[in-house]
Every structure is written in C-alpha cells, then in structure tokens.
Amino acid sequence: MQQQELEELMAQSAKDAVATSQDTFNVVLDYSADSVALVDDLLLAFIDRYKDQALEDNAVFTLCNIYGAYVGEVIRSLMGGQWRYDVSDPEAPFVVLDLGEYSYAFAGICYERLVNDSQVSVKAYFDQALANNTQ
C-alpha cells in the first residue's frame, strides 16, 4: 500500500467513525483531544446496543479500525506523525502511527477495550502518547 493511499484510508476511516457516532448514538466527534474520551464510551455503547453482534469478527474489525483511525487522526492534527502499514507478520498486518521514537497501535487499544477488558482506556493511551511526545 502506498503512503498516500494509507493516509487517505485512515482519514476516511476517521470520517466513518464521526458519521457512525453521529448516526448511531447522536454523539459528535470533533477531532479535539477531549473528544477521544467519547471513544471509550462509544465502544462500550456498541456492546450495550448490539450485544453479541458487536463482537462478531467483522464488526470488531470495523469498529476498532475506524475508531483507531479517528484517535490517530486527532493525534496527527495535534502533533503530526505518519501512518505505517506494518507487515512484519504477513499473516496479521496492522497499521500504526509513528510519532517521534514511538509507534502507536490505536486500533489495537480499541480492540483491547472492546473485546478483552472494558477497563482499558483509549483516552489514557492517547494521553500517554501526547505525554511521550511533549517531554
């Protein structure tokens, strides 16, 4: 995947998160740092509303990728960074945001909250990313 294609894909995925949040829950995501806290609530709201359907493979993949893209695009608007398609494991490629000396798997942290542990916080991960790059 070419870099420009990846950048466009992630920007469009973030827009999909904004539209889905508005259409499904009447929640406005405005690309602000404060709006990232809403992602934590939205991920759990999908489980509340759609129960087991929200945890089907296709739904999990879509939700984690669009909300991960949204969080990454918020970081990019604040601090820059570049999306990277990581194929180090060809069986399970993934997208990370490279910022400074760190790489952030925003879709992965969304997955953790949605599937494994509802106490995991996307906002806390986001805040740590900000702190790592402002010191």
Image (cartoon, rainbow, N blue to C red):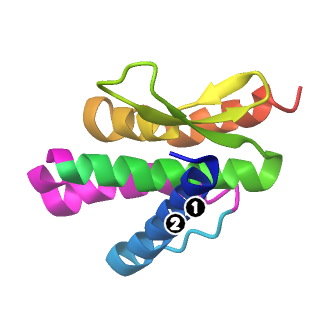
* Residue 100 x, y percent position in the rendering: 79, 28
Q: Position of residue 116 (x, y in %)?
A: 28, 29
- Left or right of 31 in this view: 85: left
Determine the secondary structure under disc 1: helix
| Local SS, label 2 | helix
Residue type (three-letter) at the residue carrying disc 1: Glu
Q: Which residue is mark 2?
A: 12
Q: Residue at x 70, y 23 (%)?
A: 102
Circle 1 residue: 8
Residue 89 is left or right of residue 34, and the answer is left
Whether the residues at callouts 2 and 1 have beta carbons within 8 Å, the answer is: yes
Name above or below for residue 77 compared with residue 133: below
- Quarter of the rendering containing residue 81: top right
As drawn, 49 above or below 96: below
Q: Which residues are magenta?
A: 32-57
* Other residues around mark 1 within 10 Å, as few (<14) / some (14–19) / many (≥20): few
